[in-house]
Image: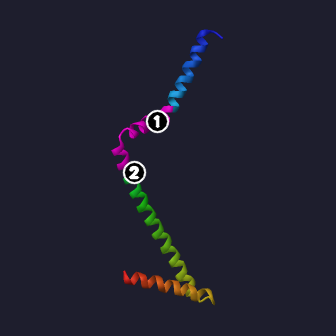
Amino acid sequence: MPLEEKMNTMYRLTFEWAHILEKSRIYQYTDLLYSPWRLIWRNILFGAARGVGIALGFTFFAATIIYILQGLGALNLPIIGDYIADIVRIVQRQLEFK
């Protein structure tokens, strides 16, 4: 293999590695590690956003379940209807107190 071919192969491989490292954003990660206050602030912000998202998602999920249970309670199913009606009554009382 001639020297020029080896150099071209090495250049191509080096260029590919540089492109892969650039795509992985390793520079931004190491920059973030060297600024701990920015890392802490970013984690606090992302944690708060995640908490708000979980709260909204659970609220939507619980409201949907209660709506479905109210519909099932209106059907007057023999055994299940009594349990569902009790659950709906308890939830409605809790909501009235708040």
Q: Which quadrant is home to the C terminus?
A: bottom left
Q: Mark 1 points at which residue?
A: 26
Judge from the rendering whether residue 36 lies leftward or rightward of residue 11; answer left or right.
left
- Please give the name of the residue rendered at 52% of the width and 32% of the height, measured from the top-left corner: 20
Judge from the rendering whether residue 89 lies leftward or rightward of residue 31; answer left or right.
right
**Observer-nearest of 65 and 35:** 35
- Please give the name of the residue rendered at 41% of the width and 81% of the height, measured from the top-left corner: 95
Furthest-right residue in view?
Answer: 1
Residue 91 drawn at (x, y percent)? 46, 82
- Please give the name of the residue rendered at 54% of the width and 19% of the height, measured from the top-left corner: 11
Residue 38 against residue 86 in the figure, above or below: above
User: Mark 2: which secondary structure?
Assistant: helix
Task: Looking at the image, tell me whether mark 1 or mark 2 is earlier in sequence order.
Answer: 1
Quarter holding residue 80: bottom right
Judge from the rendering whether residue 65 lies leftward or rightward of residue 97; answer left or right.
right
Furthest-top residue in view?
Answer: 2
Label 1 to label 2: alpha-carbon separation: 18 Å
Residue 46 drawn at (x, y percent)? 40, 53
Q: Name the residue under label 2.
A: 43
Residue 60 drawn at (x, y percent)? 47, 70
**Observer-nearest of 61 and 29:** 29
Residue 92 drawn at (x, y percent)? 44, 84
**Magenta includes 91?**
no
User: Mark 1: which secondary structure?
Assistant: helix
